[in-house]
Image: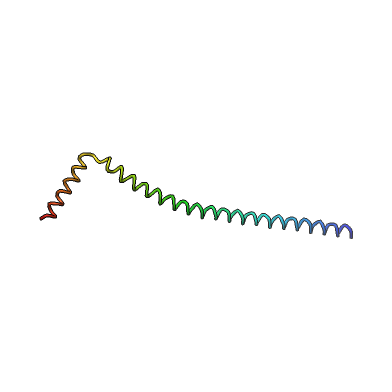
Amino acid sequence: MKRFLSVLVASMFLASAAYAADVTKEEKADAKATKEEKKADAKGKSDAVKTDGKAKSADTKAGAMGDEKKSEKAKAKTEEKAKDDEKKASK
């Protein structure tokens, strides 16, 4: 009878220890998932802000560099087109 009770108590102890370990493991997994979601949300917000800034700076750079890179021929063509448009408008 003593042996039966000692086995019963030992098995209940091991079962409760296993249950506690399982619960702790689930809580850690939930905490980790929540933490990753927060990071993803924050990263998504910062990426949106960064892309807007990059787009603005790219537009500014393209406009500034575009004027400098035009060759003399291209400048002459745009001037001729502007003159032709003025002549058409004055007719």
**Residue at image coords 71%, 55%:** 21
In the foreground, 21 or 64: 64
**Residue at image coords 50%, 52%:** 43
**Residue at image coords 27%, 40%:** 69
Q: Horizontal and vertical percent for residue 58?
A: 36, 46
Q: Horizontal and vertical percent for residue 88?
A: 13, 53
The quarter in which the C terminus is drawn is: bottom left
Q: Is residue 83 left or right of residue 33?
A: left
Q: Is residue 5 left or right of residue 43?
A: right
Q: Horizontal and vertical percent for residue 28?
A: 64, 54
Which image quarter: residue 74? top left
Q: How is the image coloured?
A: rainbow
In the foreground, 34 or 14: 34
Q: Is residue 21 left or right of residue 1?
A: left
The quarter in which the N terminus is drawn is: bottom right
Q: Horizontal and vertical percent for residue 29?
A: 62, 54
In the foreground, 4 or 62: 62
How many numbered marks, from 0 up?
Answer: 0
Which image quarter: residue 10? bottom right
> What is the residue that sits farthest to the left in this orientation?
91
Q: Is residue 55 left or right of residue 30?
A: left
- From this view, report whether residue 87 is shown above or below residue 74: below
In the foreground, 90 or 29: 90
> What is the residue that sits farthest to the top in this orientation?
72
